[in-house]
Amino acid sequence: MNRKNVDLGTGPVGKLLFSLALPTITSQIVNMLYNLVDRVYIGHMQPVETVGKLALTGVGVCLPVIMVISAFAALVGMGGAPRASIEEGRGNISESERIMGNCFTLLIVISVVLTVFFQFFSEPLLLIFGASEATIGYAMDYMRIYCLGTLFVQLTLGMNAYITAQGFTTVGMKTVLIGAGLNTVLDPIFIFAFDMGVQGAALATILSQAVSAAWVLRFLTSSRTKWHLRKQYLRPRRKVVLPCLALGLSPFIMQSTESLIAICFNASLLKYGGDTAVGAMTILTSIMQFAMMPLQGLTQGAQPIVSYNFGAHNPQRVRDAFRCLLRACVIYSMGLWILVQLFPRMFILIFNNSPQLVDYAVWALRIYMGATGIFGIQIACQQTFIALGNAKTSLFLAVLRKIILLIPLIYILPHFFADKAFAVFLAEPVADLLAVITTASMFSYQFRRAMAKLEAETTT
């Protein structure tokens, strides 16, 4: 969608939301293909019952590291982009560019630190994350190469947020389409034709991310963008960076704690169910992440509308955008829940066809995604807090679901069930249910207050 056709301050909110969300949803789904395509090919390496199964589990325990790298991109990208949108709504384009430039430099610094850290500490971390003697070799082969592409991942994910925040959702979609399409082509070539195995999968991924990063930077320095990446705004300033980091803490915690949660899940499941249970968790996590992408896409499509109109002091359009977002999220999450409960095997077979692993994952998936139907409420409310620049509440809600509820439940519930592995999987839906109730209650109160305050400021 061309920028000149995107007027965030006028026009039907529903039509605008879906015109922005559709490319963003596509971007989110395709972005997941970087890792999902790797797992699909790796899970079918022959023989499936030995090499394929162990390699899939080995790459699965790399997921926490991959999530941490993505989480830092979210910290800077999703923390700065809404603030830049709010400044644009106030008519201050130069401040939008300053925010983007400061965050670009921050992404580069973070990338260098992460690359060095993971190159030195990958092996002990992967053992903590649930790698066994049988799978650590596959995990290290993948991680040594993947970490070398940290800069490309950071720039692609982090800076692409500033493209979609301007309303250029089609350009943002092309960013990930280019990379994911290239990755899909290179994976079988490197894995099978060149016989590189999991190392080939990692190499294909970082080469594809490099192409995507080049595409993003080319656009943000071109005449087509509204906010330009300018040299004079690259030097970080505390008063610019710190508010962005504060707002970005919520999506950072949401993504980075997936690593901590993966450690807890994998360690507990390795204890109660062995490598089969850890392998099943790899599949379940992959399905959950892929299935949640449309929800992330919907909220990112709504973010420019909410942030821009909040900055422009237009409370009614903010309300309309949230209500439309909430309806769409709930309809999707309920539809997903029905499909998972009725056809779990269909989802699992995408990743592995080992009879033992598939049979185990079928019942585990139904439990693990048992509260998915109402999760649309959680993500719509939580992401709207971020779009409004409410850092404190969005941070609390991120901490609540993952750290306060889910992690303790992983260790508490097995004490009350004879089937310990079942109890570990059950922790997810119980935490989701409690988090949704809390989030909806807080949002109902605080959103009304925020809109009343905005109306008062508009009339004065």
Image (cartoon, grey):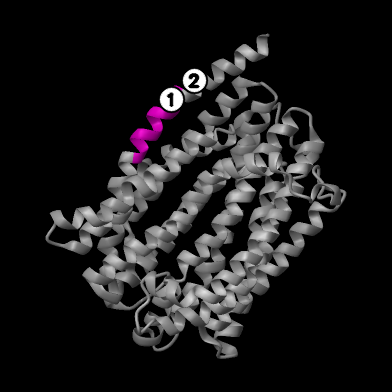
Residue displayed at 60% across by 45% down:
245
Q: Quadrant of residue 58?
A: bottom left
Q: Which residue in the protein does label 2 denote? A: 448
Residue displayed at 42% across by 71% down:
61
Amino acid carrying label 2: it is: Arg
Would you say the residues marked 1 and 2 are in contact, meaning their CB atoms lie under 8 Å apart?
yes
Q: Main secondary structure of the magenta part?
A: helix
Q: Is residue 373 left or right of residue 176?
A: left
Q: Quadrant of residue 353?
A: bottom left
**Front residue of this view, candidates 35 and 121:** 121
Residue 269 visible from this viewpoint: yes
**Front residue of this view, candidates 16 and 136:** 136
Amino acid carrying label 1: it is: Ser
Q: Label 1: how many residues lie within 10 Å, few (<14), some (14-19) or many (20+)?
A: few
Q: Provide residue 403's location: percent of width, then percent of height.
A: 37, 49
Span shown in magenta: 435-445
Q: Is residue 240 left or right of residue 63?
A: right
Which numbered dot is residue 444?
1
